[in-house]
Image: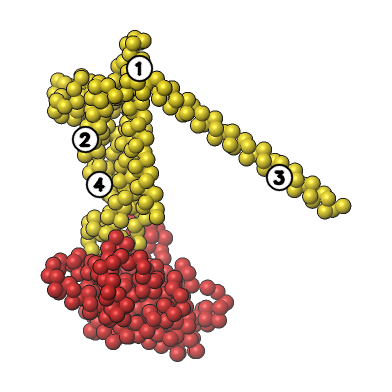
Chain colours: A yellow, B red
Amino acid sequence: MKEEVLLAAIQRRKVRDRWFTGFLMGMGFFTLLPLFMIMIAVLWNGWRQLFTLSVALAAAGTAEVTALSLVVSVPFGVGLGLYLCDDRGTATANVIRHVANFLSGLPSLLIGMAVYEWLVAPMESRSLVAGSVALAVMAVPYIARETENKLCSRTAWFHDGALAIGASRYQAWTRIALPLLARPLVAAILFSSAHMLGETAPLLFTAGGGRSALRGVFAPVPTLQLRVYGDALTARPSLAGQVYAGALGLTIFTLVIFMLAKWIEYSDAR
Amino acid sequence: MGNTLRSELLSAFYGKQQVLHRVTLSAPEHQVTTIIGPTGSGKTTFVRCLNRLHETTPGARLEGDVWLGDVNLYALDPIIVRRKVGMVFQTPNPFPTLSIFENVASGVRLNGIRNKTVISEQVEKSLRLCSLWEEVKTILHQSVSPLTRGQQQRLCVARALAIEPVVLIFDEPTLTLDPLSALRIEELIEDLKRRYTIILVTNNLQQAARVADLTALLLNGELVEQGPPAELFTRPSDKRTEDYLTGRFG
């Protein structure tokens, strides 16, 4: 009798487990559904005009503005992360960390407005460099946080090892600890650039637009984000294909960078 | 005085928490001084104070002095102190991005020596001292990852020796090693004491009895008792030592 009761209880648990697994899978499906719908809509409506000159120029502009923003943000972000890890626990480091976190939580529109005041207004023109600085301001806190976390959690042993053989703090970080993190940091930097590709607001105030991506760093530059935004605002049906093509370009950009970052992460974990 | 390492009334703190209480201890040259004690008794903090690694921990501070012979180590630059007082850690920590050769050479290079012949000689000498040369001489420029943990730990000893310290601190160096590798490290410590002042932190009482010339028991950050192991293990003068040795705690 007792065994029957036990078996019935186990059976009930199994049924509940199956329901619960099904519920979780359903949640996962509904989370992914919008993403797939967006992907299908963008692919279906955008692929015909993907290989046009205007999309190609905007893609080139996006690549330029992202690359230049990394040139600006990586030294500052890695340097700040290094400082925050080296000085962890001190009041100064805590204040700087909170300010950086606050900065990363600011609406990107505000950052665009600030860079407009700092660079666009004095130069009297939106430009590639202003767009890059706006994106860099957004990327620095992210890169700093990733650098700090990775340095402190993954290299403490080796950092101590370097100090114990007479390295200075600077040598221990730059010659021993940082090279250990080369791959994960490159992955984090790529993730930050993928994140920046989703930002339109700061570029609205700073990058400008125009039709050519090759007019130099102080000239306005077209980007895919601005192309999509600008064409969508006109609400002309004839430009719908252009809007979708721009969105598809952005999606491809993001996907490629994301997959590259994932591959680097994976190869580092091995 | 020579190369005797001596702490005088050494107290260490993490923030407001005091973890060492006025520890005065001498580690004579050419002898192995073992520090024993249960987990959390302050052994690692104590040895990190000796080579001034303690102060690299945020919020850490210290009172008291450490003398090497007649030189106060807290009056020197910490980088110079760490060149004189080498350290080997619990877990082997060779630098994974460097080759075997570069691991040993790293300390020499970090200390400003650029001459390739000098560096090569120093690497070979250090690896020979650790009885590792014959095992790695054909794979010197390969990564450290194929080495066993025991070999990696001896490589870390070689790395510490390459900068020619006068004191070597071993902080539970065999904790993560298999018995055979642990035995080789013990033999290495026996060998090295002819050249260096050695401090060995261990939780393993048998190991302390085997290799120590002098043993000290730390308990809750206090130095309870110190003396030759034969005496301390058989005729402890403090009840707490007897309790620890007989397994009543720790």
- Chain of the residue under label 1: A
Category of crowding for the residue at label 4, using alpha-carbon neighbours closer than 10 angstroms: few (below 14), some (14–19), many (at least 20) = some
Q: Position of residue B1 (x, y in %)?
A: 24, 84
Is there CB contact under 8 Å for labels 1 and 2? no
| A28 sits left or right of B158 in the view | right
Count of numbered labels shown in the rendering: 4
Q: Evaluate whether label 1 is on the same chain as label 4.
A: yes
Q: Position of residue B151 (x, y in %)?
A: 36, 74
Amino acid bearing label 2 = Leu
Q: Give the residue drawn at x 41%, y 63%.
A: B18
Residue that numbered label 4 is attached to: A79
Q: Can residue B195 be seen at all in this image of the molecule?
A: yes
Amino acid bearing label 4 = Gly
Amino acid bearing label 1 = Gly
Q: Evaluate whether label 1 is on the same chain as label 2.
A: yes
Identify whether A131 is placed above or below A256.
Answer: above
What element does badge 3 sit on? helix
Q: Nearer the viewer, mark 3 or mark 4?
A: 3
Q: Earlier in the sequence, mark 3 or mark 1?
A: 3
Report the Cα–Cα distance between label 1 and label 2: 29 Å
Question: Residue A14's mark?
Answer: 3
Residue that numbered label 2 is attached to: A68
Residue that numbered label 1 is attached to: A241
Q: Earlier in the sequence, mark 2 or mark 3?
A: 3
- Chain of the residue under label 3: A
